[in-house]
Structure formats: structure tokens, C-alpha cells
Image: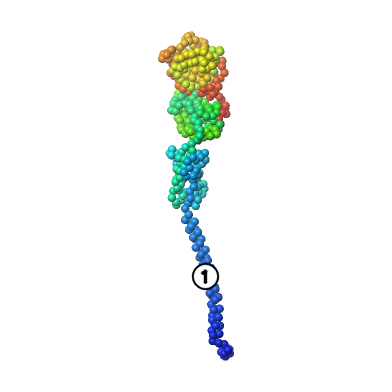
Amino acid sequence: MGVSHISNRSEKPSERWSRRGILTVLGVVPAAVLTGCSGSAGAAESASSGGASAKASVKAAKTPTVTVSPADGTKKADFTARVTVTVTDGTFATVKVTGNDGSTLAGTFNAAKTKWTSTKNPYSGTKYTVAAQAQGAAAKTATFTTKSPGETFVGYFTPEANSTSGVGMPVSINFTHAVKDRAAVQKAITVTAEPAVEVVGHWFSDTRLDFRPETYWAAGTQITLSLRLKDVEGQDGIYGIQSKDVTFHIGREQISTVDLSSKEMVVKRDGRTLATYPVSGGNAQHTTWSGIMVISERFKQTRMESSTVGLGDEYDISDVPHAQRLTTSGTFVHGNYWASTAVFGHENTSHGCVGLHDAKGANNTSVAGYKFYDSSMLGDVVIVKNSGERTVAADNGLNGWNLSWADWKAGSAV
């Protein structure tokens, strides 16, 4: 076999080497191709892996972006919407919103801690600073100022702050603008007592809201009125401006009962009879209101003029002594120096007031008018019976005690 191959002389050396070269090349190429294929797959895998890592690094390197609403620098931001702070490409570590009035606006995060929302609206006319910090990032600070309301209202309250009143004194609030949204306004006002008792509000009109318990306050009670009316919309475009707490106190219990049949007034202090006075009430043409009344004003001396209560020119007395108001319409319990002493305890001769014997000048300490005035205070209860007149309207003075508890509660808006 080998000789036969050698004897083939027709093959030229160059051809033989070319063939060997071809065979050699043909023998190498497949290896190179495989190797090349193997090398290309590894390179692709490496490139793919490297690209993913690069993308991850880019993503990890992104800076968290914090956005505040209202936007930073806003000068007249809406105060009727919540404040929100959001972060993208991160999560929150802390968010704090403070006003230039010293208040802090509380808020909560969502589950992912990418959004913070205030639990209440911001106050009007207030500059706020937002300090928000995302995890692993520097804190971001933004400021905005809320606009002021165009028109406002307040509630004037009785009794006065830090005063002491009798057990019949309600908490009465008169608003400077009519209230359309009674529920919103009433929810913004609370009256609490110590010792605790249920206290309910009753609307007498769109400008008057009174609070009282079911029965008279207990002697010694401390009452707190909390007004949270700031930015509460009483009616379209009219907002409250008050945010304050007021405390007042209830003193001893004094309840005086006037019987105009016997023409006598019995004064009881803490359940015990303190004094009994002969009185004179309204005559047949000018009967005295009956019912439960509360002393709402007190004057050592005052002028009483009949024209102010629709009685023409029947009287004008410049120095009525020891006058204590029972109704807005003009009923008083007061001293009387111009009538004979024989009238008191025997005749009803007044134009509707309850009179006690008194002396001109209001300085005689021995007379009934002085003594009763000296023993009384705002908020004391005066009950009139057997007067021949119907029960006084609950809103005629501070006289809501003439409503049953059920009727009183029916006047609440919440």
C-alpha cells in the first residue's frame, strides 16, 4: 500500500504540500470554529451579565426625588386641602411640617412610605416649612404660605372666661354671621364639665347656639369651652377664626322661687332656705312671664324706660336699684323705692317685673332689694309661678331650661 502511494510520481511536491495544507487547514478550522463559538457564547454571557449589573448600578445610584403639594414657594396656597409629600426612587425616613405660629401639622405615611398626607388641613394665613428626608438622602426643605379667608366670623360667648356663675348658667354662643353649616360649626365646639356630665348643644337660630346638661350644673363644677372654629366654613366663603379654650366655674347653688299668688319669693341656697321676701309682680294688664329664668345681667342702678319695651311713655325711672335681668324682652327682678311698702306681699302692681322693697340710692343694706341683690350672682335661677302668664320662650334670655331634655337634644345639629 505504501509503495503504491510512493510510486505516484505524477504528484508534484507543491501539490502534495497544498493538499497537506488544505488538510491541515481543514483539520484546524473546525476546532477554531468550535473554539470561536464557545468563546462567543461566553463573551455574550459576560456582556449580558455586565449590562445587568451596570443597569442595577445606575438604578441604585438614582437620587430620591421629593415633591411637596402645595409646591415650594406658593404664596396663596389653598387651606381647604390636605398637604401631601411624595418621594420617587426612594422611601421616606421623616417628614415634618411646621407653621410660623408654632403649630405642627400631623400626618401619616402610606404603607410603602412613599407618600405622607396631613391628617388635617393647614391653617389659613400661615407660612409652613416642610422638612422631608428620604432614606439615605439629604433632607429637602420647602415652604409655602396659605391664603387668608376673604370673610370671617367669630362666636361671642357667655359666661366670661374665668368667671364664676350660678348653676343655671348655660354656655351661650352668638355668631357674627349666620351659620349655614350648623353641623360643621357645632362639631368644632365642645363643652366639657368636671365632674363629668353629658352636655348638648341646641340651636335657637342660625346665629345662636347654647349648651347645657339635662339638669342644672352641680355646685363647684368646672366647665371648659373649646372653640376650634378656625377655618371652619360657616357658610359659603365665610370662615371661623377662633381656636381657643375657655374655662369658667359654677359656684354655690341658689334657686329662688317667686309665687305671684302668695306674692312671696323663697330663696334657697344649696337646698336650704336662705331668705323669704315679700314681692310685687306684674298686674293683670302686664303679667309676668312664668317659668324658669336665669339672671343674665346685674346693675346696682339702671334706667328703665317704658318706650324700650313697647309701653309708650308710661314710666321713665333713671335710678332703679338692684336690677337683675331675667329676659331679653325686659323682665327684671329689682328693687322698688317708689311704691308703698304695703304693696309688697299684697298686690301685683308692676308692668311685668318682680319688685322688692328698696331705698333710693341703692345703699340701704337693710332692705329686701339690697339683700337679694347682694346674695345673687349671674347664672342664678329664678322660677316664677302663678303669674297668670304663659311660660317664657326658651330663647328669651338664657332660659333654655324651659325645654324638656328631649326637645333640647332635638335642637342639636350633630
Most foreground residue, 185 or 384: 185
Which x, y percent locates residue 39? 52, 70
Q: Is residue 68 visible?
A: yes
Q: Mark 1: few, some, or many residues within 10 Å (few <14, many ≥20)?
A: few
Name the kind of residue labelled 1 in the image. Gly
Residue at image mark 1 = 39
Residue appearing at x 47%, y 26% in the figure? 159
In which quadrant of the rendered view does residue 374 lie? Answer: top left
Q: Is residue 97 visible?
A: no
Which x, y percent locates residue 314? 52, 12
Residue appearing at x 55%, y 85% in the figure? 15
Residue appearing at x 44%, y 48% in the figure? 139
Question: In the image, is residue 370 above or below residue 183?
Answer: above
For the N terminus, the quadrant is bottom right
Question: In the image, is residue 123 above or below residue 371?
Answer: below
Which x, y percent locates residue 240? 50, 33
Which x, y percent locates residue 380? 48, 22
Question: In the image, is residue 87 above or below residue 273?
Answer: below
